[in-house]
Image: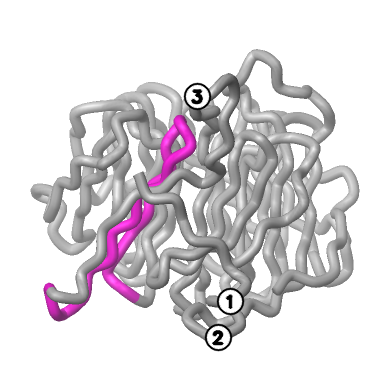
Amino acid sequence: MIAARRKLENPARDAISGVQFAPRSNNLLVSSWDSCLRLFDVDGSELRLEAPSEAALLGCCFQDESVAFSVGSDGSVIRYNLHSGAQDTIGSHADIATCIECSDQTCQVITAGLDKKVICWDVRMDKVISHSINVNGEVESISLSGCNLMVAIGNSAYGYDLRNLKRPLQLKESPVDARIRCISSSVFFKGFAVGSVDGRVAVEISSSSNSNDSSYTFRCHPKAKNGRNHLVSVNDIVFNPLGLGSFVTGDDEGYVALWDAHNRRRLFELPRFGNSVASLSYNHGARLLAVASSYTYQEANELEELPEIHIFETNELRPGSAAAGSSGTKMQSI
């Protein structure tokens, strides 16, 4: 279940593009369209670092507790020393850079963007591209789990192995016929989930035994207006980092819900936020969930109010338990 809620004061002056908890602490990284990267100490509700740049920041990630990266609307990939505040540009895309991940296994930063490229940067050397992949479309979302990289292009999901990037390991045509807005992979089982701009989520779970494979699609919030499905973009999906088999979704209408991936049930839903849910992040122990409530520049009628970041203390029911099963709501398959 989700318990107490706190709110970080003044998290950004423009739309939030991404939030991410640190690998081992409760420090939270925030990227924003106001061109600033911020680091918050969530335990103390304190702003520890504010690092301005020249372009809107569209994504961020940690390398470790002392180093972080961001990507910007000018294509730049920026590295930050979180202790000193120093920053340097390690490289650039030819167009807007939309997303970023960091691999501690291969010592690479992986970025992607509207120039139809996925680029791996060697963080051990200055401005060195270790690999560049030409893909067949603009990339809106990537997700890294170990050495497995998932890339969302249009309504398709591509899987790569960072140790051999010559060609994708798999191509998954999404059961949704709309553009994929976000993609997320799980560390604890071979699987991933995608969220589409029309409010659907597609989940694929693979196991060592093919008989236990699972693939399904459902609509997060099956509400209707005038007898038709109300299409709301799913902006972010995060899996529980402890491997409980659950994931959280956040959408453009301000809803956040926790789902049991294996038993296909909604465990609970938070009260609706006043703005879109732009980004979500669990801390390393899955005891805290950060929710960024912010306009996302996707809808013409979005409320351009100052964004908010809410921190929830969580005590999730283990999926499959009697309590979870009895209180949950069955997913509406489509």
Mark 3 packing: few (<14 Cα in 10 Å), some, or many (20+)?
few
Locate the C terminus by quadrant.
top left
Asked whether disc 3 touches disc 2, contact meaning CB atoms under 8 Å apart, the reply is no
Asked whether disc 1 touches disc 2, contact meaning CB atoms under 8 Å apart, the reply is yes
* Amino acid carrying mark 3 in the image: Arg
Q: Is residue 311 above or below residue 237?
A: below
Q: Residue 145 appears in which quarter of the rendering? A: bottom left
Answer with mark 3 or mark 2, whichever residue precedes in sequence.
3
Q: Nearer the viewer, residue 160 or 305?
A: 305
Q: Residue 264 appears in which quarter of the rendering? A: bottom left
The answer to whether residue 274 of the structure is visible from this angle is yes
Dot 3: element: strand
Mark 1 packing: few (<14 Cα in 10 Å), some, or many (20+)?
few
* Amino acid carrying mark 1 in the image: Ser
Residue 147, position as x, y percentages in the image: 27, 66
- Name the chief secondary structure element in magenta: strand
68 relative position to 185: left or right: right
Distance from Cα at disc 3 to Cα at disc 2: 34 Å
Q: Which residue is mark 3?
A: 228
Q: Which residue is mark 1?
A: 326
Q: Residue at x 33, y 71 (%)?
A: 105
Q: Which residue is mark 2?
A: 322
The stretch in magenta equals 189-210
Q: Residue at x 70, y 47 (%)?
A: 292
Q: Is residue 265 above or below residue 175?
A: below
Q: Is residue 328 above or below residue 157?
A: below
233 relative position to 295: left or right: left
Q: Nearer the viewer, residue 199 or 79?
A: 199
Residue 115, position as x, y percentages in the image: 32, 25
Dot 1: element: helix
Distance from Cα at disc 1 to Cα at disc 2: 6 Å
